[in-house]
Image: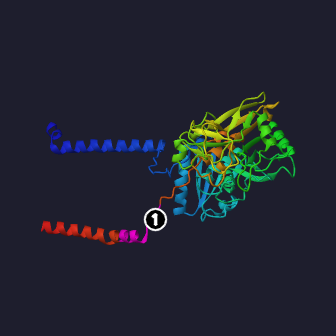
């Protein structure tokens, strides 16, 4: 017996058995951990296959079950749906995804009013929302609407030369991009004219005053005052009263007077920033670039994210017996404020111009008689930063949506939004394409054949 135990074959069999047991144990443990802890790593440069911080926050804090139904045909379309929705399931056990084959279950698709391939329906209890687009923005947006119970309303004031929502020009005047991204964040957007009726509609969640060039009359300002002091929310984007060009900007004393009564003074100046950041990012002295922010829910998530504000004015702030104001961000110490608003030639005079830093944005709350009467407002000494021309700059888009979310008391949605996929295509001219084609079709195959012949002849 002992001799059999010591034979070479027995030892090899024992070693093989141990190896097999160890390998099976490792595979079993790996499968158990993979099933219990579903983790992935996105190695792409632009994190193309990662969900945004906003989605992680919304899904990670779910308190109730959510069902996402995806409708498509079996094959590539269904696989594309799984690629996105599986990432939602990883974030929370509250998310349940069902994939519906349109050919096998046409009645279910009809019951959900699904009319085309690649649609997703989000259900939270009895509430149901369709994803407007099947991407992260569309799915997360529908989830937010289902959780919040529908869309909210953003009312943009018109009638005094404000930015127009129907202007799609890529200039400082175009404001169609504002409407697009706010709608994607699950707000309805409408234009209102307080001259026709000096009353803010009751369904307005947030009122926006976007860069008026003309002066508001007292009844309009009274309507805004009543709205905010009764618990309303307002965003004021006020440009410096420049007296150059074909459209000079009025001082708007009635509107700025209202803000001053709340403790926010809009100075009649133009900010010039000569910091290295402004020069490096191409903004120039008339477009201050912000890299550092104060502590506030609106800007806490913008660490290491830059924002730009072309043609801005400074703000001064203090608290009153009814209001509490907080600075959001300021210009650099290399900034100046000039009061020469009638000259197209911009020159910094260190001996005359005030030296920075200067406050550029303020968030405030108005304390009413009841908790429900507490209003909120944000004042920015510039409106062009939210226009089509500048909205795509670095963090401008996120800053705008953060302001809207804070004003509408949706602080849980304040975060960095999904990043648009980066176009990483390689553009080749005709000569480069010819070289690439010759190398791939002829040079490389001939090189492989030559190596093969050399090996064959050497062996012979």
The secondary structure making up most of the magenta span is helix
> Which residue was labeled with disc 1?
427
Residue farthest along the front direction in this orientation: 351
Residue drawn at (78%, 30%) of the image: 322
- Residue 195 drawn in magenta: no
> x and y percent of residue 101 in the render?
58, 61
Residue farthest along the top direction in this orientation: 321
> x and y percent of residue 162 in the render?
75, 52
> Which of these two is toward me, 261 or 233?
261
- Image position of 10 (left or right of 19): left
Image quarter (top left, top right, bottom left or bottom right) of the C terminus: bottom left
Observer able to see residue 202: yes
> x and y percent of residue 190 in the render?
76, 53
SS label for mark 1 = loop
Q: Splitting the image into 4 quarters, where does residue 317 fall?
A: top right
> x and y percent of residue 157 in the render?
78, 50
> Which of these two is toward me, 87 or 416?
416
Q: Which residues are magenta?
A: 425-437
* Disc 1 packing (10 Å; few <14; some 14–19; many ≥20): few
């Amino acid at each position: 017996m002992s001799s059999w135990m010591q034979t070479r074959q027995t030892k090899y069999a024992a070693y093989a058995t141990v190896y097999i047991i160890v390998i099976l144990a490792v595979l079993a443990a790996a499968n158990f951990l993979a099933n219990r802890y579903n983790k992935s790593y996105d190695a792409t440069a632009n994190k193309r296959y990662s969900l945004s911080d906003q989605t992680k926050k919304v899904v990670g804090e779910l308190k109730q079950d959510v069902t996402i139904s995806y409708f498509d045909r079996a094959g590539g379309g269904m696989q594309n749906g799984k690629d996105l929705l599986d990432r939602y399931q990883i974030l929370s056990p509250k998310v349940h995804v069902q994939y519906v084959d349109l050919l096998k279950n046409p009645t279910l698709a009809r019951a959900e009013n699904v009319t085309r391939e690649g649609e997703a329906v989000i259900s939270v209890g009895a509430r149901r929302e369709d994803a407007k687009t099947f991407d992260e923005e569309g799915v997360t947006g529908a989830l937010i609407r289902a959780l919040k119970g529908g869309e909210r309303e953003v009312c943009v004031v018109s009638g005094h030369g404000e930015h127009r929502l129907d202007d799609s020009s890529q200039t400082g005047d175009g404001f169609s991009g504002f409407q697009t991204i706010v709608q994607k964040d699950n707000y309805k957007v409408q234009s209102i004219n307080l001259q026709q009726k000096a009353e803010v509609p009751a369904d307005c969640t947030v009122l926006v005053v976007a860069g008026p060039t003309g002066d508001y009359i007292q009844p309009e300002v009274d309507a805004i005052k009543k709205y905010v002091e009764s618990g309303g929310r307002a965003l004021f984007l006020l440009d410096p009263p420049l007296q150059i060009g074909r459209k000079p900007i009025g001082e708007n004393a009635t509107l700025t007077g209202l803000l001053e009564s709340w403790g926010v003074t809009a100075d009649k100046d133009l900010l010039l920033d000569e910091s290295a950041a402004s020069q490096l990012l191409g903004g120039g002295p008339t477009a201050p670039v912000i890299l550092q922010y104060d502590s506030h829910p609106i800007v806490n998530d913008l660490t290491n994210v830059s924002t730009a504000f072309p043609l801005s004015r400074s703000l001064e702030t203090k608290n009153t017996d009814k209001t509490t104001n907080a600075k959001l961000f300021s210009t650099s110490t290399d900034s100046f404020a000039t009061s020469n608003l009638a000259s197209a030639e911009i020159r910094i005079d260190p001996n005359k111009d005030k030296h920075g830093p200067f406050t550029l944005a303020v968030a405030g709350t108005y304390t009413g008689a009841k908790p429900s009467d507490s209003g909120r407002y944000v004042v920015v000494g510039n409106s062009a930063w939210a226009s089509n021309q500048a909205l795509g700059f670095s963090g401008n888009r996120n800053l705008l949506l953060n302001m809207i979310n804070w004003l509408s008391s949706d602080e849980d949605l304040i975060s960095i939004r999904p990043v648009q996929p980066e176009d990483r295509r390689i553009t080749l001219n005709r000569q480069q394409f010819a070289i690439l084609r010759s190398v791939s079709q002829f040079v490389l195959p001939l090189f492989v054949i030559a190596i093969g012949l050399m090996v064959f002849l050497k062996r012979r």
